[in-house]
Image (cartoon, coloured by chain):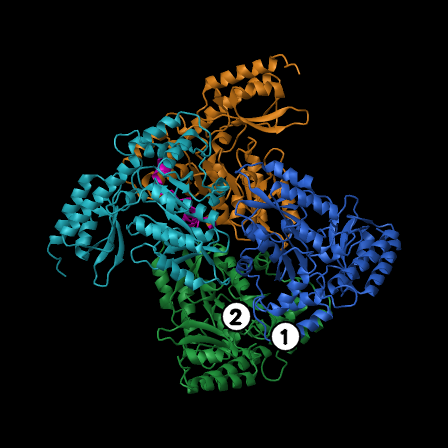
Chain colours: A green, B blue, C orange, D cyan
Amino acid sequence: MKTYSFCNDYSEGAHPRLLQALAAASNEQNTGYGLDKHSARAAQLIRARLGGVDADVHLLVGGTQTNLVSIAAFLRPHQAAIAAHSGHIATHETGAIEATGHKVLTAHAGDGKLTPALIDEVLRAHGDDEHMVQPKLVYVSDSSEVGTIYTKAELQALSASCKQRGLLLFLDGARLGSALMAQGNDLALADIAALVDAFYIGGTKNGALFGEALVVCNPALKTDLRYLIKQRGAMLAKGAVLGAQFAALFEDALPGDALFFELARHANAQAARLRDALHAMGIGFLADSPTNQLFPIFPREALERIEARYDFHRWTELADGRIGVRLVTSWATRPEAVDGFIADARAALSAPAIPA
Amino acid sequence: MKTYSFCNDYSEGAHPRLLQALAAASNEQNTGYGLDKHSARAAQLIRARLGGVDADVHLLVGGTQTNLVSIAAFLRPHQAAIAAHSGHIATHETGAIEATGHKVLTAHAGDGKLTPALIDEVLRAHGDDEHMVQPKLVYVSDSSEVGTIYTKAELQALSASCKQRGLLLFLDGARLGSALMAQGNDLALADIAALVDAFYIGGTKNGALFGEALVVCNPALKTDLRYLIKQRGAMLAKGAVLGAQFAALFEDALPGDALFFELARHANAQAARLRDALHAMGIGFLADSPTNQLFPIFPREALERIEARYDFHRWTELADGRIGVRLVTSWATRPEAVDGFIADARAALSAPAIPA
Amino acid sequence: MKTYSFCNDYSEGAHPRLLQALAAASNEQNTGYGLDKHSARAAQLIRARLGGVDADVHLLVGGTQTNLVSIAAFLRPHQAAIAAHSGHIATHETGAIEATGHKVLTAHAGDGKLTPALIDEVLRAHGDDEHMVQPKLVYVSDSSEVGTIYTKAELQALSASCKQRGLLLFLDGARLGSALMAQGNDLALADIAALVDAFYIGGTKNGALFGEALVVCNPALKTDLRYLIKQRGAMLAKGAVLGAQFAALFEDALPGDALFFELARHANAQAARLRDALHAMGIGFLADSPTNQLFPIFPREALERIEARYDFHRWTELADGRIGVRLVTSWATRPEAVDGFIADARAALSAPAIPA
Amino acid sequence: MKTYSFCNDYSEGAHPRLLQALAAASNEQNTGYGLDKHSARAAQLIRARLGGVDADVHLLVGGTQTNLVSIAAFLRPHQAAIAAHSGHIATHETGAIEATGHKVLTAHAGDGKLTPALIDEVLRAHGDDEHMVQPKLVYVSDSSEVGTIYTKAELQALSASCKQRGLLLFLDGARLGSALMAQGNDLALADIAALVDAFYIGGTKNGALFGEALVVCNPALKTDLRYLIKQRGAMLAKGAVLGAQFAALFEDALPGDALFFELARHANAQAARLRDALHAMGIGFLADSPTNQLFPIFPREALERIEARYDFHRWTELADGRIGVRLVTSWATRPEAVDGFIADARAALSAPAIPA
């Protein structure tokens, strides 16, 4: 049994306030399939933050599900999505997008972020050639799969480029809370709503038992979306379970900001402490992440000592034998666990080498 | 605002014991994607009731999802499912099965139940003709969409017939709790496990926030099922949320039977009270249901008076102007609400006709 | 070895003029994938008959292929086609439409023809219910699968009804030649083009080696269709093979009418001779077909005598033991074979019964 | 109007012997859907060359169609194909494989050929991880999309590696004739049949109007294949049209070898003359192709002069401004056209530069 897990940000359940909201709603009778008052209120709370964009909000259960429902809804059969080669839909969804009939085209993005130039490379390779799929939707993640974030200027450039080229822009926000609370971020929900055709706000990785709030900004994409949600098995019978959680995350009667942002701030703060401490020990990183995913590089022996006490994923092995790993903090990460990890890492790094 | 809803059995949230189990698990760190200890324990508790059948148990979120994941996993592209024409996959899943590429063939079953004879009708119409789809999987629901249940003899006959004809037998148990606790039922989970290739045990409609436990009995159908679950967006990141609920439903340390059965018994008991009282008032029924769905037929005027106070669905309008409705009770139905409905129905039926 | 086959209208190859056109084009170098001069000329010849409708014409290889390419191109994932329950897409295409993700809804049409009333029945059963598929496209066949044809008034009524209800109207013309040349027909290609959203003109069953000319009349359905044709494996590399055949069928420099109509007239004439002769023998028919498919009903013993000499399909067995069969004539049916069949049928019917 | 086209090997129609066979069969009555005597004979002629492998032979219309029917038939929904990144299914089939639900994984193969090492790279990236697709089928083309061929040793190594790793090996033989007749080839049809699970023999690009003979060697892959062919719209009604062509290509009563091989030899010979002549002029090549596709690299000015007289495709532009093009010869390429091209290329290359 390990001391603590930094494997991911879905190890723990839900924040107590969400559990209370759930328990309260549990005693009521609510209309099914997302047509309940809690879902309506959650949608209203989210829409209030969109700067006047008249979006539709749908609450779904998980990220892969939201990606496949949306992309299958938005594309015609011959159209393809463009993603960074590290994009979640391109790698870790068991071909969910292809299972709906659509190819995922990829561009190599060292930092996990697409740019207009990378997209244009893909477009140039496809021309107007009916023997190839037609690129139609750009998929970006904020934060990205390697923890990086988009600046407002970067997202504006993507948005302008997509509009000009007739491409839809879709933002996977499974870790959007962490992105928006990250140092260096200058985007708000309203900016995103103004710049993309659709995006989602991840609850699963930020304090909810589960749940992703899909926000459809482009009016042309709104039609019949509930049919498509139902068809893919993504319409929760007891939708109030989603509604109550998202309402608790976004209600602003709280002192300070909504819980959604507080929780993300906590995850980022714990990650920052880890990052700063490791940096002070001379540890380098695979990617420069200001969010709750860190990719430090450890010498093998030190790593093995740390692994004896903590759970996390090995990510890659470098040519020099050092190993890049992924450490993830969450809304629930205990500060003392971070303290412990830092102390143990320092000890592991300073320990004498094990004689061969 | 109506007094009470008999619309369905997913109006309320979860039983308090499940909420407690959830809250407890919420504070832990658990492995993701269903590989946690709660899911393992839930699977073990379910397997212990299968009479020695060495089944795989997977916990999914919802019924449509479980149907589409399973059927798409079990069939080759040219193969079709056979369902009663009232079967859920044939009517109320927005073409979820067809969206995975498979036709759903139907047979008219007045009582919502397939028989070997009905299946043979479908087979005769298809022969070994490669210009038609190949029927390969028989889909039955227990209880059925009109509240009826299969007896052991009926399921044995279906099972034998399917085996002989090379068909897979799949049982949708979204309302299996109510079926197994119904008057006239002689099936147990172990019988079902011995007779079908795969089935599922519905949590959503029997005390859980959500969740269906897919039980795969046929070894040939087990391979790689987790890939297929992930691909369809049906693998919950925080699988412990499902595990904790199903463990709470099936742990047998409780006095009497497991909670799963107690809750179904409650729903059935409330339905029985409604049925008996309506019967005593001279009300007829569309179907002879011993489970938690009733289909009484009301004169229009009386119905409109009842509808002023209660929510439920109109089902069909008869030639004589009377209207068949659906009343559904649940694990959470309050006995005093049933009392109230009975009193109000009696009053509505005995009230003088509204002058034209 | 049987004397002659009345099994279907694709037993023979192509009319000699098409073979000559093919042989001539075979020596040229032509652009691939339907962008050749023969395909362009065929499209032009067909468009010239559409009464000014500015349609796109695509030449595909076969009927199932044309149905699946078109329907998959025209529908969003949650939308369904409506067909007569005898419709080809509903029965004899091995679930080709479902394999592209779309449900085929059926209405029972005794004579193989849909009507606004039948369509409305389907619509009423589906309402605006996102738990059911959304009916969006009406599929009709002219001639139908039982040989019947639509009158202009009938097609106008269907067209008006579809427009009013937001449905697309798609006409499968695998046997359109025979329909247009049938006694009682008052439709021309230009009428059809004005009334439907898309249709196709069957070459396979009317003198070509293969080939169906898809005519897309509704501008909204034209976009990117060549992508969809290619994606389904339906774009012939040597498209000139299709172009040369359709050009030969529709060029009007010939004395009299285009070959396409002459060939259909021949098939109908041979069917008419069969029909009249059988009628004179007192034989009844399953359907009242004025086209090249006949469905006579024979006493079993007489049938067995006829089957000893001729190939054709048994269609159905009546309660009284008599058997309905399908006889199909084609552009290539030899008149003397018809004479022979008539004589042999007469003899079989008048022969003394075989003693039991 | 250009003098001649070297665009591809499907510019011309069919060899006269095939047209004669077609015309002869056209007058007969044949059973439909590939159950005719010509298709049977073609299958028999092909099977006779498979060294005793008891394969099923199906005649399909085109290459994309054959790829999508086969791969969709052979894989379960979560399984993926592995192809060279230049593989036809990965690039030029408009996502036909993805449209059947399967991802195509690619490995960068400079010469268009997969190796066990390249496949292992893909496997290593996927592990036994249910969050990623499961690689299951290896797709190779012989000749490849850049004209290269597999040696027997290479195909044996691939076959052994696939068997060991539980992968299916599928060979796209759209240009198999040219591969088998190429200098350096040591494979025969019997070798391929012994080494792969399924492959096909391309008729379209080697003398037929169209047609690919799918050869299924692995008994486990044979079941119900005709259903899948029909479902994808790939079963030609007049199958005798395919049968007569393939019988004419493979009948060995001819002096010397079967026509199939003679035609490929002709295409290769013309390509060889082009290659040798261009090589003598100092022209380099993008790939070292012994088959009927050549990829010479021309200086821009010379190229523009040549393009004024000949049709062919530009392939890529090099950093130094030179341009790689693709020249394709066919069974029908006229030797004098090759002579003309060589003379014109020589003139273009030696012409004085156009003053800026």
- In this rendering, position of residue D344 left or right of residue D113: left
Q: Amino acid at mark 2?
A: Ala
Closer to the camera, D324 or B142? B142
What residue span does the magenta drawing correspond to?
C220-244
What x and y, as percent, mark residue D3? 21, 43
Residue A57 at least partly seen = no
- What residue sits right under mark 1 in the picture? B26
- Output the chain of dot 1: B
Total of numbered circles in the picture? 2
What x and y, as percent, mark residue C352? 63, 12
- In this rendering, position of residue B5 left or right of residue C237: right
Please rate how many residues cluster around mark 1, counting C-alpha atoms within 10 Å: few if below 14, some from 14 to 19, many from 20.
Answer: many
- What residue sits right under mark 2 in the picture? A174
Q: As drawn, which residue projects farthest toward the front?
A: A356
Rendered residue at 29%/34% (across/down): D259
- In this rendering, position of residue A222 left or right of residue D187: right
Question: Which quadrant: the N terminus of chain A?
Answer: bottom right
Closer to the camera, D305 or D281? D281
**Element on which disc 1 rests:** helix
Question: Which quadrant: the C terminus of chain A?
Answer: bottom left
Q: Is residue C125 above or below residue C108?
A: below
Q: Amino acid at mark 1?
A: Ser
What x and y, as percent, mark residue A220? 51, 60
